[in-house]
Image (cartoon, rainbow, N blue to C red):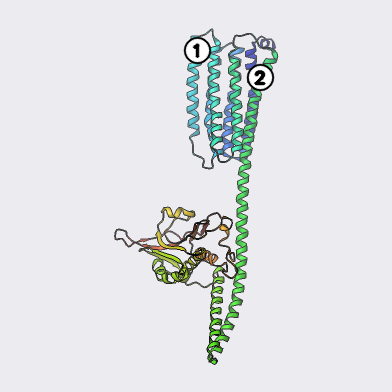
Amino acid sequence: MHSSFDALSSFDKINLASAFLQAVVASSFAAVQHGVAAHFDRPAMRALARFWRLLAAAAILNILSSWAGAVWNNKELSRAINTVVVALLAAGVPYIQLATDALASTDRPRRRTIRNALVWAASALVLHAAGAFGFGAALPTLRVVAVSFSRVLKLAVLTVPAQIAWTAFGRAHQHKRALRLLAIGCSALAMRQAIAVVLGFRVGMPDLPFAAVVAAITIEVLAIMLFGVMSLLATTAEELAVAQRQSDVLARAEARLASGERMESLGRLAAGVAHDFNNVLQVVRLASGSLRPTLADGNDRAILDDVDGATNHGAALVSQLLTFARQQPQDATCFDACDRLRSLTPILQRVAGKHVDLTMSISDDAAIILMDPAQFEQVAINLVSNARDAIPDTGRIGVRLDVVLSGDDACKRGNVPPGDYARLTVEDNGHGIPDEIRGRIFEPFFTTKESGHGSGLGLPMVHGIVRRAAGSIVVESTQGSGTRFDVYLPALEILRTRSDDAPKASKTPTPPVHVAAVGE
């Protein structure tokens, strides 16, 4: 065995030694990659593990091909086995594509990877068999031609994964570091095969020095080791990125939970303060009422009128506190939101003020909703009041009420659940909401108004009312251009005014609560 190996040419020595070492390295990395994929079960890891299994199988068969050609001197058998090797390498191309797709995008397309792998393998099998056996039969004395064709075809097959990886790296919006590592590893495989092509031109030429043989074998083995290390680093980067995303999601969930607990505590505090304050107001009202019959002076009566006005204002504040704290009694009834808003138009015009151009647009359809009518009015009044305060001097406010049917594009805004809705829209051209506070607008007692000009309960009260009505709020705002609030209230029934539209009753269950604020 030793003497027969020494008698081989340097070309065959490089083939055999490199094939043995590559098979060992490829099998080792395939086992490691399979273990990593089985443990973490990530898409890119699974795809790379399958590619490594094909690469290891090709490396093992390459030993038989080299042995058949060099030791057994059976060139036909060597070409046949080498044809299968090329087919296995080609079958791995779709798995590299699958791995790069999984790394480059969260929207992973469903690919028929097995079918594509079979197509690649069959194409490479036919092409290699035709070329290798064709050149071998036509030029039996020029072994270099068949060998060079086989190696160039392998180079072409191994260049495709490198091109796929670099393209994915260029267009990716995530995992760019992992894709760069994978692209470098695939390029190393292609470079290793390029060296093999150059060495293939030396078939039949004088032997290389021993140092050159060792160097060639070392470079080929190091190249495949580099690919192994890079693929493992790529899958590690994928796992780290997934862990970071999960950590961010957990942090946001904890922040929402803490915010919910804080708002619940504030609600209980607000309810307690409101009840105590309401008791004080009742005493003031009784005292004022008992004094009024005994006073004849007009100035004294004017003072009592001021006291009554202050107590009424305090009672309104108490009502807001109780609404926010969810302890205000409700009288939920079915009513037409469109008719209700029409009757509220004069009040909204007074709320908007003379310096603001208020436009009303109310659908002719009937949208029957179930909630406290007074609270529906509170939502409209508070949103118009909030819009008025956002306009510094003169401006405009648009109030619109229309119907939105299940499946309309309007339901896709802010992830509003599918269903039939009465949509109340209040839009202004004021200063807008700054990005840094947009996520806090529904927090109780949070206000950007000057001291004494706002309690910070208007929008939280709207939020609470809409949430209890199983509705949704979508907020859009551009600083300097204005703000738009869309309130979606579930409609029990929508009656069309057009004769060609039959009345439609929504039988869908009440949608869950969802509040979306831009930038939140």
Q: Hey, which quadrant is residue 155 in on the image?
A: top right
**Foreground residue among 330 and 290:** 290
Q: How many labels does the image show?
A: 2
**Foreground residue among 349 and 288:** 349
> Mark number for residue 135?
1
Q: In this view, does 60 lie above or below 479?
A: above
> Mark number for residue 217?
2
Q: CB atoms at circles 1 and 2 under 8 Å apart? A: no
Q: Quadrant of the C terminus?
A: bottom right
* Image location (x, y in percent) of residue 404: 41, 58
Can you see residue 47?
yes
> Mark number for residue 39?
none
Can you see residue 92?
no
Q: How far apart are marks 1 and 2 (CA)?
A: 27 Å
* Image location (x, y in percent) of residue 487: 47, 61
Left or right of residue 351: residue 69? right
* Crowd rating for badge 2 (residues with CA inside 10 Å; few <14, some 14–19, many 20+): many
Q: Which amino acid does label 2 sit on?
A: Ile
Residue at image coords 47%, 56%:
417
